[in-house]
Image: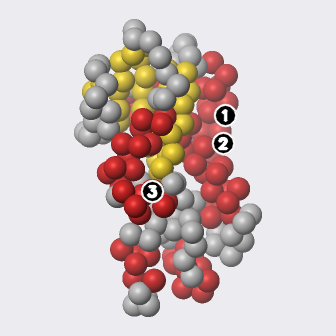
């Protein structure tokens, strides 16, 4: 049986996609832990090691428009399914948190703080974070005035300032309350 760890990043962001990582490790990788506890350089080095040695690495994305159309919970279900779409065989899945986004797949369970205790989940956390951060850095080249390379879509003071000055983009989650306030002119 292959153990697959899964975790998401971007849940609370105001712009950009929700990204889910799925990883089945082939061997132990030193230094794995929750991506939020690592600096950018550590995450990027570990992501290279993970991609180079894992049995499986999958990324699932739910775009901002899908989050707006289906809601955040349903977007999670989409992104989790997309992350494992190319995975076959006898698997056991551990999802970080307390919500099973893959209820139709047997041998799936949730573990709170699994990103701190299960290496495959830590690895999934890292690859998802690195993927999303790099995507937001690339998108910042199209949206020069928004600072996506710095705040990667989260609601920082700088992001708010950019939204007030330049308006809402197609990357923004228009159903999120802070973005709705700006759209409706109540800022």
Instruction: Give the numbered dot on residue 114.
Output: none
Circle 2 sits on which residue?
Answer: 41
Left or right? Give the position of 98 relative to 9: left
**Residue 121: where, in percent of width, then height?**
43, 30
**Which quarter of the picture shows residue 2?**
top left
Instruction: Report the residue at 67% width, 30% height from top.
Output: 48
Circle 3 sits on which residue?
Answer: 66
Q: Are marks 1 and 2 in contact (CB under 8 Å)?
A: yes
N-term mark: 3 or 1: 1
**In whole angstroms, how far apart are the C-alphas of marks 1 and 2?**
6 Å
Indicate the quadrant containing the N terminus: top left, top right, bottom left or bottom right: top left
Q: Furthest residue to the top?
A: 1
Instruction: Report the residue at 48% width, 29% height from top.
Output: 85
Instruction: Report the residue at 35% width, 36% height from top.
Output: 96
Which class describes the residues within 10 Å of circle 2: few (<14), some (14-19), or many (20+)?
few
Circle 1 sits on which residue?
Answer: 45
**Residue 24: where, in percent of width, then height?**
49, 20
**Which quarter of the picture shows residue 107?**
top left
Above or below, 13 against 119 in this view is below
Given this view, does label 3 or label 1 mark the residue nearer the observer?
3
**In whole angstroms, how far apart are the C-alphas of marks 3 and 2?**
31 Å
**Residue 106: where, in percent of width, then height?**
28, 21
**Residue 82: where, in percent of width, then height?**
48, 36
């Amino acid at each position: 049986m292959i153990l697959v760890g899964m975790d998401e990043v971007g849940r609370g962001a105001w712009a950009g996609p929700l990204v889910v990582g799925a990883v089945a490790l082939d061997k132990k990788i030193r230094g794995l832990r929750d991506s939020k506890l690592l600096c950018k350089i550590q995450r990027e080095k570990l992501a290279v090691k993970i991609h180079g040695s894992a049995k499986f690495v999958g990324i699932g994305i739910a775009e901002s428009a899908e989050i707006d159309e289906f809601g955040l919970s349903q977007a999670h279900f989409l992104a989790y399914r997309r992350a494992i779409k190319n995975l076959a065989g006898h698997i056991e899945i551990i999802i970080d948190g307390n919500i099973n986004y893959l209820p139709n797949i047997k041998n799936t369970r949730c573990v709170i703080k699994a990103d701190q205790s299960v290496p495959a989940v830590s690895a999934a956390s890292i690859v998802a974070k690195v993927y999303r951060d790099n995507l937001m850095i690339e998108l910042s080249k199209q949206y020069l005035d928004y600072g996506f390379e710095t705040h990667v879509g989260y609601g920082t003071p700088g992001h708010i300032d950019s939204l007030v000055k330049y308006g809402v983009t197609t990357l923004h989650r228009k159903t999120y309350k802070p973005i709705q306030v700006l759209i409706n002119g109540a800022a």
